[in-house]
């Protein structure tokens, strides 16, 4: 099994990456057998992997508690968390117990939030089952539930004890979810690693086809890039904000379409294309590099043409929770493989970039 290490002052952890390894999780858990494990999943992932995971944990000698929540972002809620607390209390979970989050980013964030708050915090194991969760949300400790007035509004930084990735589970993922995860993978290349961007250009077809060797390389590299950033800036005081490349306009698109039109990575893809346009207009990024990014995203099957006007998008930007004093913050690429945070992007520049991203349609 390959590992990526994340070193943090309050607890380092390993990200295990393997293929067909899900049922071996019990071998890697750092807990005594008398402790109870609370496996939290949803009603899509549960029937695929939940039962066999629980059986395997029991075979390793662990006592288990198992709960499914319905599938969907709307269940990343206080109401779901409350049901899970009830289940935990009734099931006798104590401070020696641990939560195992088996699912995509929704389950990882929700179960992570429950682990962070139940009895003031019990250990969390992330077992991510979407590409997005394997390369992004399971690493770095952001856990949250949504509030009716805003996504991810209530949460915490709560690092897992370990992350256990089985690439084989991606084979049952809807191809649209694979593409959504690829947007975050491409993001890492742009903000941190030109060589990785080149690698993705060269091997995209194989990655999309879920070639396991390529997936392994891509997931490990993504975890490594994210892990190194989190090590330097766990609480997002500066550097970690680079992970929000594409998220300023991407998030506005998700909000204006009520999270119903775009998968997260699709909105981020559009946001990256627009941010690259701003960077190219500022002379920070060669026009040819902005085009390479748009082409890679399009080849990944991600959208690159924004179907909304600047007038529709711009008012939402200042309401983003990452905006500072009503001014949107943008991560702009400085070439491929490097990026920086900008607070001084003028409305006219954003307007111009969005209009260019609309025109590509014609
Ligand atoms: P998701 O969790 O909704 O999963 C997408 C779909 O795939 C769901 O229908 C899910 O049931 C299904 N699924 C999961 N694994 C599967 C498998 N192996 N086979 C078949 N189907 C499977 O969505 P996501 O894109 O993984 O995560 C999005 C969430 O992650 C959002 O709530 C977002 O806010 C959060 N997020 C968190 C962070 C973080 O740092 N904590 C980062 C990015 C995104
Ligand atoms: N997904 C962004 C972060 O973890 O900071």
Image (cartoon, rainbow, N blue to C red):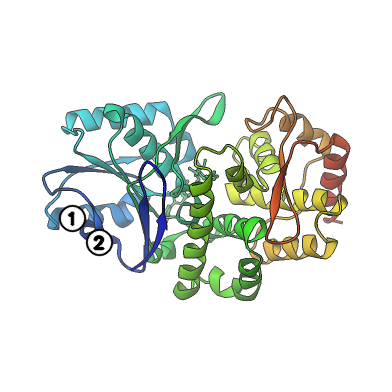
Label 1 crowd (10 A; few <14 / some 14-19 / many >=20) = some
Location of the C terminus by quadrant is: bottom right
Indicate the secondary structure of the residue bearing disc 1.
Answer: helix
Q: Is residue 190 shown left or right of residue 279?
A: left
Indicate the secondary structure of the residue bearing disc 2.
Answer: helix
Residue 214 on image: x %, y %? 50, 73
Q: Quadrant of residue 3?
A: bottom left
Residue that carries the numbered disc 2 in the rendered image: 23
Is any part of residue 1 visible from this angle?
A: yes
- Quote the CA–CA distance across marks 1 and 2: 8 Å
Q: Quadrant of residue 316?
A: top right
Residue at 73%, 55% in the rendered image: 304
Residue toward you, 361 or 20? 20
Residue that carries the numbered disc 1 in the rendered image: 55
Residue at 65%, 66% in the rendered image: 197
Is any part of residue 263 visible from this angle?
A: no
Residue at 80%, 57% in the rendered image: 285
Label 2 crowd (10 A; few <14 / some 14-19 / many >=20) = some
């Amino acid at each position: 099994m390959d590992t990526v290490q994340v070193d943090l002052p309050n607890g380092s952890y390993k990200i295990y990456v393997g293929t067909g390894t899900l049922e071996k999780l019990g071998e890697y858990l750092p807990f005594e057998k008398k402790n109870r494990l609370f496996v939290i999943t949803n009603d899509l992932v549960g029937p695929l992997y939940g039962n066999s995971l629980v059986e395997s944990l029991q075979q390793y000698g662990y006592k288990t508690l198992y709960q499914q929540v319905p599938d969907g972002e709307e269940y990343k809620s206080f109401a779901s968390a409350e049901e899970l607390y009830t289940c935990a209390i009734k099931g006798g979970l104590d401070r020696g117990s641990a939560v195992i989050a088996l699912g995509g980013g929704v389950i990882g964030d929700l179960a992570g939030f429950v682990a962070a708050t139940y009895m003031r915090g019990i250990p969390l194991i992330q077992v991510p089952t979407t590409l997005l969760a394997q390369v992004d949300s399971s690493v770095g400790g952001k856990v949250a539930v949504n509030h009716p007035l805003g996504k991810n509004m209530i949460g915490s930084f709560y690092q897992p004890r370990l992350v256990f990735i089985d690439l084989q589970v991606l084979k049952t993922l809807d191809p649209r979810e694979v593409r959504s995860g690829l947007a975050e993978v491409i993001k890492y290349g742009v903000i941190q690693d030109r060589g990785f961007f080149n690698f993705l250009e060269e091997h995209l077809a194989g990655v999309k086809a879920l070639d396991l060797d390529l997936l392994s390389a891509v997931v490990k590299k993504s975890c490594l890039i994210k892990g190194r950033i989190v090590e330097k800036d766990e609480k997002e005081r500066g550097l970690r904000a680079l992970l929000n490349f594409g998220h300023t306009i991407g998030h506005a698109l998700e909000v204006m379409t009520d999270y119903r039109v775009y998968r997260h990575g699709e909105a981020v893809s559009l946001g990256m294309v627009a941010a690259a346009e701003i960077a190219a207009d500022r002379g920070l990024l060669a026009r040819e590099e902005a085009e390479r990014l748009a082409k890679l995203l399009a080849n990944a099957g991600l959208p690159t043409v924004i179907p909304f006007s600047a007038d529709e998008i711009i008012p939402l930007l200042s309401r983003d929770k990452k905006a500072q004093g009503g001014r949107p913050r943008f991560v702009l690429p400085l070439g491929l493989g490097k990026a920086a945070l900008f607070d001084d992007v003028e409305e006219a520049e954003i307007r111009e970039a969005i209009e260019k991203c609309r025109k590509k349609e014609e």
